[in-house]
Amino acid sequence: MRKFATNLNLSKGGLVASIVPGGPADIAGIRPGDRVLAANGHPLRDVIDFRFYSDEPPIALTVLSGGEAREITLPDDDFADPGVAFAEDFFDGIRECDNRCAFCFVHQLPRGLRKSLYVKDDDYRMSFLHGSFVTATNLTDEDRKRIVEQRLSPLYVSVHSTDDTIRRKLLGNPNAPPIMDELRWFAKNDIQMHTQIVVCPGINDGAVLENTIEDLYGLYPSVLSVGVVPVGLTAHRVHLPKIEPVTPEMARRILPMIGDFQAVLEEEFGTRFVWASDELYLLAGRPIPAANRYGDFPQLENGVGIVRLWLEDAKKTLAKVRRNPDRWRGLSADIATGVLAVPILRDFSEKLRPYGINLHVHEISNTLFGPSVTVAGLLAGRDILEQLRGKLETNLLLVPGVALRNGAFVDDVTLPEIEGSLGVMGRAGGRCPSELLDAIRERS
């Protein structure tokens, strides 16, 4: 039996949440509640380490069980996934941000929300695992060595501006390292990146925005894509620099400029490379581009192309309803959503009405964060309660699934509380039209 790793912190490692029945870990006797401290002698900081050091058999895990650390070698016949799920991705805690960005959403939150919302993460591991954008201002030499050794690519980097004076102003960090040096280092080490630019009027728009895009496409294909999104501002900006919102007029100036870049870059590289967020199109009152204009949708989690995918699914769903209208006739529900999505949902509901499907779409204004916050994912439960009381037309209310975390809205109001207060059945709506109708059918 191989000697297990020494000098391990018995309070660290990954807490096992579940085991795949019949999998290697199950056969070896690992159970939920155990703590995996090391894999093949390497102490584990997170699930990335676990995957990296458990990539090939034989796999020897140092496991803390019942207060005793022991080494367990997993069976390697027909080697497959070890079959272990951990309670958390990071065993040593998440790395928080040391910047003070002028547009940081955490700094714009009111008091009294769930604690997790106040965590300012800026952890490159979150970037690799979940596509979270990080500033890359807090990387250590050890981080860099690990990124290269474990091939943590692609990463998602918040650039905002390649002019370091402007970027440091936006980040509120005069010591932020030169961003182009950082990006070139990633490129030199074959680490690819998706990047984003949060547009703040009068600071990094106009010529600054154009120069930033030019600098980034100079690093293609190491820089794979650029997402351009408008700054999000709440009504709770205390002790933060004044920033103006992106207006419809500004959005209408930004979109043609991005279109010009796309035309040139598609001709040169075969990719449009830079994309505007859906919010910019909706704000400008411009049509959402066709699906084939988004490539493989590389910036989807950044709100780039979500509406187009929704519209494509709406077409398929309408065709399905037309083919068999009797299956759907008589469905009805009330739908609560944010201001931004109302025109799209109402257009869809109007197209369904001739087939006997009645969806009543309700626009919910965001009084918690302020009227400039229009996305459905940040709706508060109390806003839904206050604005829909006495206005519902059916006994089924669909709320945006993206607004719920562990069954609760951002203000910790739960769906059962809404059901009880409004006297309706509540349901988290689907992410697309087909799921939306399926959710209504299940409760009808």
Image: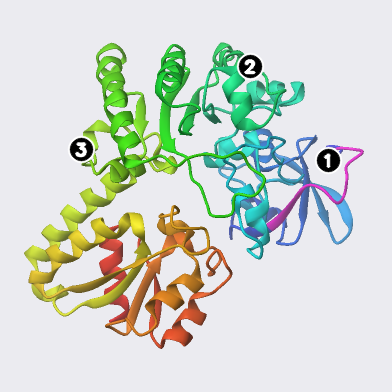
Q: Is residue 374 magenta?
A: no
Picture residue at 9% right of the left edge, 68% below the top: 324
> The C terminus appears in which quarter of the rendering?
bottom left
Q: Name the amino acid type tagged 2.
A: Pro
Q: Is residue 14 magenta?
A: yes
Q: Name the amino acid type tagged 1.
A: Met
Q: Are marks 3 and 2 in contact (CB under 8 Å)?
A: no
Q: Main secondary structure of the magenta part?
A: loop
Residue 386 % position (x, y): 45, 77
| Pointer 1 or 2: first along the chain | 1
- Camera-side residue: 51 or 428? 428
Residue 137 % position (x, y): 67, 27
Residue 47 % position (x, y): 66, 43
Alpha-carbon neighbours of circle 3 within 10 Å: few (<14), some, or many (≥20)?
few
Picture residue at 48% right of the left edge, 40% below the top: 244
- Camera-side residue: 313 or 413? 413
Q: Which residue is mark 2?
A: 178
Is there any visible trace of residue 38 in the rendered image?
A: yes
Residue 41 % position (x, y): 80, 35
Q: Which residue is mark 1?
A: 1
Q: Which residue is mark 3?
A: 290
